[in-house]
Amino acid sequence: MRFALSLVVGLLAFVPSCGYHFSSVDGVVPQGAKSIAIPVFINGTMEPYVDVEVTKAVVEEFLTDGRLKVVSVENADLVLRGRVTKFEMAPLSYTAASYVQSYNVTIGISLSLVDNKTQKVLLQDVGLGSVFNSIYAVAIGDISQTKIAKDGAMKKACKDLASSLRSRVLDGF
């Protein structure tokens, strides 16, 4: 009985398994690229500092990932440039007295990734970000709490956007 069980277990080790898994499609980064520069994104919106927050989130995302070293433009193999093209706050819910109770924050960007040696454009996307939304609540009668909630929602939307951008560049999806 023990021999039969060992034989079955041994044979199962050679049978290919079936199941779902995610496999990375090659990203757009060429072989041998080890560094990336991420200059401050351009703010094409009326929202102050959104460019700084997006840039900070993107840099942090690449630093955390660690596959590419973040360096200056002069020392980089790749240069990622971006422009914040959209910042919207849309009312999401209202109180019984018709005051806005929460907003939906949407951030959109356009970007280009260039090989710094050949100046070849590796990736260009003009509409990334329209699905990255973050909700924040309005504290009625307390504008400072509303401002804190708005800033937190913006940072969360920037982090989600940066994660998608990193995945797009390094993993191809």
Image (tube, grey):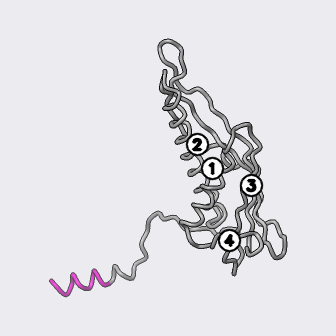
Part of the protein shown in magenta = 1-10
Disc 4 or disc 2, which is closer to the eye?
4
- Lower position in the chain sequence, tag 1 or tag 2: 1
Extreme-top residue of the structure = 97
Q: Which element carries disc 3, helix, strand or loop?
A: strand
- The percent coordinates of residue 53 (x first, y second) are 63, 49
Name the amino acid type tagged 1.
Answer: Glu
Residue 84, above or below 168 = above
Residues at marks 4 and 1, CA–CA distance in whole angstroms: 18 Å
Helix, strand or loop at label 4? It is loop
Counting residues from the start of the chain, the first of labels 4 and 1 encountered is 1
- 40 falls in the magenta region: no
Residue at image mark 3: 82
What residue is shown with label 4? 71
Which three-letter amino acid code belongs to the residue tagged 3?
A: Gly
Sort mark 1 into few (<14), some (14-19) or many (20+) by Cα contacts within 10 Å. Answer: many
- Indicate whether residue 4 is drawn in magenta: yes
Asked where in the image residue 11 lies, by quadrant, the reply is bottom left
Residue to which mark 2 is pinned: 154
